[in-house]
Amino acid sequence: MCGIVAYIGHREACPVILKGLRRLEYRGYDSAGVALLNGQLNVYKKKGKVADLEAFIADKDIHAHVGMGHTRWATHGEPNDVNAHPHYSTSERIAIIHNGIIENYAALKKHLQQQGHEFHSDTDTEVFVNLIEEIQKQNHCTLEEAVRLALHEVVGAYAIVVLSKDAPDQLIAARKGSPLVIGVGEGEFFLASDATPIIEYTNEVVYVNDYEIAVIRNGKLDIRTKEDVVQTPYIQKLEMELDSIEKGGYEHFMLKEIFEQPKSILDSMRGRLELEAGHLNMGGVRAFEQKFMNAHRIIIVACGTSWHAGLVAEYLIEDLARIPVEVEYASEFRYRNPVLSERDIVIAISQSGETADTLAALELAKSKGATIFGICNVVGSSIARATDAGAYTHAGPEIGVASTKAFTAQVTVLTILAMIVGHRRGTLSDVKLRELMVELYTIPQKVEKALELDTEIQQIAEIFKDATNFLYLGRGYNFPVALEGALKLKEISYIHAEGYPAAEMKHGPIALIDENMPVVVIATRDSSYEKIVSNIQEVKARKGRIIAVVSEGDTTIPPMAEFVVEVPHTSEVLMPLVSVVPLQLLSYHIAVLRGCNVDQPRNLAKSVTVE
Ligand code: M6R
């Protein structure tokens, strides 16, 4: 949610910043801007994408060795040139970029207006920069001191970078609740919301912690807390490959990521599923073994697609480990007064590891004494760092806003977790464990096979691209898959879609079915197969247009459906890893055929760091 990037060093700053902004564009793409410090403090910003900004600055003087840039996902104020970042202070001597929300901005703004500050935008960020200016004026202090004092006044979340005309070789940054990484090069530094703009210059990074301020000047990095206590920067080595953040010949990141799933699922099993040795390992679970043994309850908190992975985990953990599971929307959980005890384990699932609601939900659970286990994709992310233990999904960077490979990697990790805990608790026998391990091992090949359906699905997409509504139905393990299929379609093609447990349909949604309604039914062979066949009959009787996802070799359903997509058969508990693939492809092709921007759907951002 908003991307920030900054540079100070011997290179031309602007090209580094623009390239970084293009990498961060998945975080927001309403408007973009840069501020460059070269004796002057020049701000250039434009509504639209980074490409619009590039066109706008083509004839400007962009020579500078210090600068910063921002790509916006609007919160306060509509997307336009004025609300775009960076924002100047009233004197135009200071500029700021900001990712987050300042909750007390209205009160601060009123006070600053009384002190004579002028505001041009509708943003909370412009208040922040004027607050810094006012504090500096009142206290006759350095910029660094003014930023530090301002952090005591603002309430909310931020990752900021501040430049001042009066401090020409200095860059100041701070964070609370929004991510900030510093890349440490040879006499140069890179700052960004994540490591993707940094990776091609250096693999040495420092993750800034909440309430820390970083000051870079004279080739040195100084980090302090907002109480002015000096911190020793902890430099970590990045393991990310440059290839993993490029499109690699695919038209869209989303398509690349769908096709990467055989590999990303394998990566999420690597070192965890050792078939020959007959072992399952997961460091985080081992560390918590007694907690899992004695858990009264597992509560899963997540949002969006990660919440759907959590629903699959509910089935898995209850089935295999016999521990009661509740799956909660993090945004609701954090504002309830949930009953939690020290015998509860809270699992937070998040691709980005930065989702504000999920982070707040786990902090709440922590404060009530529950044990927190994290499942994140982004290494070093806020959620990963806030948990007691956890497991990374190792899916590699996911850039497409619509989550695909992160979902299957999350489900894989959760499956292994459920298998380990079930086996240790004695609810999953040696024989059943072995069978599942063997089957899990085959999943990457089965996903590969499911991906071969691409052309077939493209043809189905052609037929349904102009539909205005879709229903997705599934039962058991395929119910969360129905929800996920519907979410994928909504978010990238803007077609209204609903996911339902197939049997619930007769309690309401069946009224929607007529000869125009496409109904995607995930009806692979499992314990509720006969039941879902009846549900298909019910749809057919009302002339719904059935697109059925079935197990290879099914002969019962094809005569009832208008279109049939056959996926390889696997165990019921592993089926979501395979059955979700055709739904990802269907939404992708429909969106492309409708001319939608698949990787950057309207109103969305990859990482939702505001509530
Ligand atoms: O990074 P997270 O997994 O915490 O993100 C949660 C949701 O914002 C995310 O899954 C969102 O729903 C995606 N756009 C779904 O494709």
Image (cartoon, grey):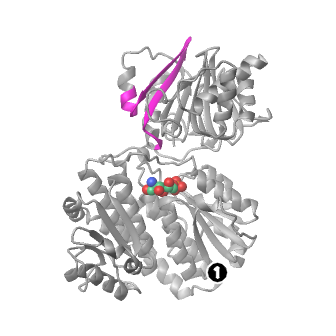
Q: Given the current orientation, which residue lies at the most extreme top position?
A: 39
Q: Is residue 273 visible?
A: no
Residue 564, relative to residue 251: is it above or below? below
Task: Check disc 1 and give the amino acid type.
Answer: Arg
Coordinates of residue 125 in the picture (x, y in percent): 59, 32
Using the image as rendered, state which of residue 248 and residue 59 is in the foreground.
59
Residue 319, relative to residue 370: is it above or below? below
> Helix, strand or loop at disc 1?
helix
Using the image as rendered, state which of residue 55 and residue 511 is in the foreground.
511
Residue 456, relative to residue 156: is it above or below? below
Left or right: residue 573 compared with residue 318: left
Mark 1 crowd level (few <14, some 14–19, many ≥20, 10 Å Cα): some
Coordinates of residue 279 in the picture (x, y in percent): 57, 75
Using the image as rendered, state which of residue 122 and residue 150 is in the foreground.
122
Residue located at (58% from left, 72% from top): 417
Coordinates of residue 231 in the picture (x, y in percent): 76, 36
Residue located at (24% from left, 82% from top): 541
Q: What residue range appears in magenta? A: 27-53
Coordinates of residue 486 in the picture (x, y in percent): 38, 64
Using the image as rendered, state which of residue 402 and residue 85 is in the foreground.
85
Q: Is residue 48 magenta?
A: yes
Residue located at (50% from left, 32% from top): 70
| Picture quadrant where residue 515 is located | bottom left
Left or right: residue 244 compared with residue 116: left
Left or right: residue 505 compared with residue 351: left
Q: Is residue 386 visible?
A: yes
| Picture quadrant where residue 560 is located | bottom left
Residue 449, relative to residue 42: is it above or below? below
Residue located at (47% from left, 35% from top): 71
Is the C-beta of the residue carrying label 1 under 8 Å from the nearest atom of ligand 1?
no
Location of mark 1 (residue): 424
Could you tell me how many numbered marks the image carries? 1
